[in-house]
Image (cartoon, coloured by chain):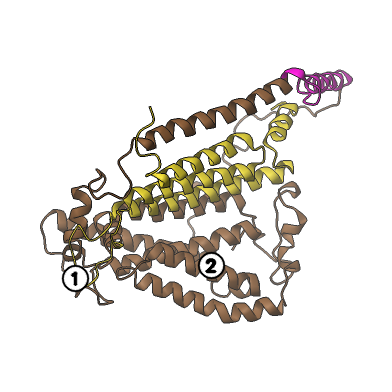
Chain colours: A brown, B yellow
């Protein structure tokens, strides 16, 4: 594409600074180490050392003792108050307790007909309260993004020194040497771990897929199955190192998987809530309860949630391990 | 003052005591990782409390078996959903707190919160 050559684009690509030469600019005077400044800085640091001297400060020691005593007392009083509350609660395990009201009765009595899910909890969280679950998936996604911002080590864009060993450009205090060289020193040929992982990882991942796909029929669902798959991926990563996992899981994979899963979830559920609220036919078949392809949108939504959770678990581990994917 | 059901509701009582243990960890520990562990103990206490609230003696888990759809056959499904929400939020919060702790450790090379704040003050910040 031909680039337009007007002032805005030249500014945008960083070729021209519109202020340069137009605005009066006076360079700052060069900093000099004056003796008086040094004396002042020394006096300040002496004063701070005296004020914040934690070793022999009698008031501070008394305060710390008082704080510990007060904290223990506070916790004991809190436990006492709450235990008195518990002792006045209705008896445990009774059907007539006020928590067992018409809401749960309604979910149990007509959940199967309305959502098609045999597992009533799945029917509740992915159909009646689907937007709540959507919010949870988004919470996971936002947490990953925040951890990415906090932990990320920037890679140099051009010319890595060696293949597979990126060059990091953050200041040295942010980055211990061990972290920068995590990939060089990681154990690559641990035979026991690799044998066990080669045997276990397929089983773990297949079990996770089973838990996700049977979320509407049996205990489980997107969150638990996704966590199982994430654990399998972490085991694989630990056994075979980042070079193997980067063949199929990079930052791009995470980005697109989460984007498509969350967008599909949002659009599908918005459609079903829109038609439901306006008494329109949604055209989503509920199928026979108990079959694997049944209960309308719950199975695809479970798969979406499972993908997001699996990617999140793996990404948390990778970020904490080395600040990248 | 003490009600009649303290020993019948032993599950809830255990949850409350766990909550107190977690909270005292949060107040008394100086190590940031141990504080996070305390917060996780408090989360666990909340899950236990919710699960206890949803349980009804002698009933099955809320998965329809043999076509029985009587409300008197299953336990309350609502607290299970709430526990799920709690777990997700707790995982996210723990991850963010741990990453902040790692940043602090890289800057100050200690996990002791008192020492970090002391050094902040000595640096004149």
Q: What chain does mark 2 sit on?
A: A
Residue A15 visible within the image: no
Give the camera-side residue of A277 and B65: B65
Where residue B62 sits: x, y (%)?
28, 62
B108 relative to A275 in the view: left or right: right
**Magenta segment range?**
A35-59
User: Residue B30 in magenta?
Assistant: no
Question: Residue at coordinates 60% horizontally, 77% vertically from top-left?
Answer: A197
User: Residue A57 in magenta?
Assistant: yes
Identify the residue position indicated by label 2 in the image.
A231
**Dominant secondary structure of the residues highlighted in magenta in the image:** helix
Where residue A47 sits: x, y (%)?
80, 18
- Work out whether B84 lies above or below B29: below
Question: Residue at coordinates 77% horizontally, 56% vertically from top-left?
Answer: A177
- Work out whether A151 lies above or below A19: below
Question: Residue at coordinates 51% horizontally, 54% vertically from top-left?
Answer: A144
Give the camera-side residue of A46 and B39: B39
Q: Nearer the viewer, mark 1 or mark 2?
A: 1
Numbered disc 1: secondary structure: loop
Question: Residue at coordinates 56% horizontally, 50% vertically from top-left?
Answer: A149
Badge 2: few (under 14), some or many (20 or more) residues near its Cα, within 10 Å?
many
A318 relative to B112 in the view: left or right: left
Q: What chain does mark 1 sit on?
A: B
Residue A225 visible within the image: yes
Give the camera-side residue of A29 and A173: A173
Mark 1 and mark 2 on one chain: no
Identify the residue position indicated by label 1 in the image.
B67
A33 relative to A247 in the view: left or right: right
The quadrant in which the N terminus of chain B is found is top left
């Amino acid at each position: 594409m031909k680039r337009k050559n007007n002032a805005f684009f030249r500014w945008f690509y960083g070729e021209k600074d519109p202020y340069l030469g137009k605005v009066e600019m006076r360079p700052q005077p060069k900093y000099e180490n004056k003796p008086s400044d040094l004396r002042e800085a020394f006096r300040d640091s002496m004063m701070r050392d005296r004020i914040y001297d934690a070793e022999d400060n009698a008031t501070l020691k008394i305060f710390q003792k008082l704080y510990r005593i007060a904290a223990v007392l506070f916790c004991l009083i809190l436990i006492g108050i709450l235990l008195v509350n518990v002792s006045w609660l209705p008896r445990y395990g009774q059907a007539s307790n006020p928590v067992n009201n018409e809401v749960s009765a309604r979910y149990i009595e007509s959940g199967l007909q309305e959502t098609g899910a045999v597992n009533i909890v799945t029917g509740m969280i992915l159909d009646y309260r689907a937007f709540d679950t959507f919010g949870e998936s988004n919470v996971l996604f936002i947490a990953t993004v925040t951890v990415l911002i906090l932990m990320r080590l920037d890679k140099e864009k051009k010319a890595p020194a060696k293949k597979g060993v990126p060059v990091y450009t953050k200041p040295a205090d942010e980055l211990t040497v061990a972290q920068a060289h995590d990939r060089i020193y990681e154990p690559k040929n641990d035979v026991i771990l690799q044998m066990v992982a080669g045997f276990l990882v397929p089983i773990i991942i297949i079990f996770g897929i089973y838990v996700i796909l049977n979320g509407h029929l049996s205990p489980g669902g997107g969150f638990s199955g996704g966590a199982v798959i994430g654990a399998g991926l972490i085991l694989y990563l630990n056994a075979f190192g980042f070079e193997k996992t980067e063949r199929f899981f990079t930052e791009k994979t995470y980005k697109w998987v989460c984007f498509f899963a969350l967008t599909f979830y949002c659009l599908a559920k918005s459609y079903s809530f829109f038609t439901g609220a306006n008494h329109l036919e949604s055209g989503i078949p509920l199928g026979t309860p108990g079959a694997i392809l049944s209960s309308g949108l719950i199975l695809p939504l479970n798969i979406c949630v499972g993908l997001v959770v699996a990617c999140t678990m793996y990404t948390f581990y990778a970020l904490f391990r080395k600040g990248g994917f | 003052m003490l009600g009649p059901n303290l020993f019948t509701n032993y599950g809830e009582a255990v949850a409350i005591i766990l909550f107190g243990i977690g909270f005292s960890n949060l107040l008394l520990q100086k190590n940031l990782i141990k504080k996070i562990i305390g917060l996780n103990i408090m989360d666990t206490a909340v899950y236990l409390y919710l699960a206890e609230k949803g349980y009804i003696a002698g009933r099955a888990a809320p998965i329809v078996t043999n076509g029985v759809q009587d409300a008197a056959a299953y336990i309350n499904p609502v607290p299970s959903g709430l526990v799920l929400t709690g777990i997700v939020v707790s995982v996210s919060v723990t991850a963010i707190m741990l990453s902040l702790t790692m940043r602090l450790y890289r800057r100050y090379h200690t996990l002791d919160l008192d020492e970090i704040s002391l050094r902040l003050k000595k640096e004149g910040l």
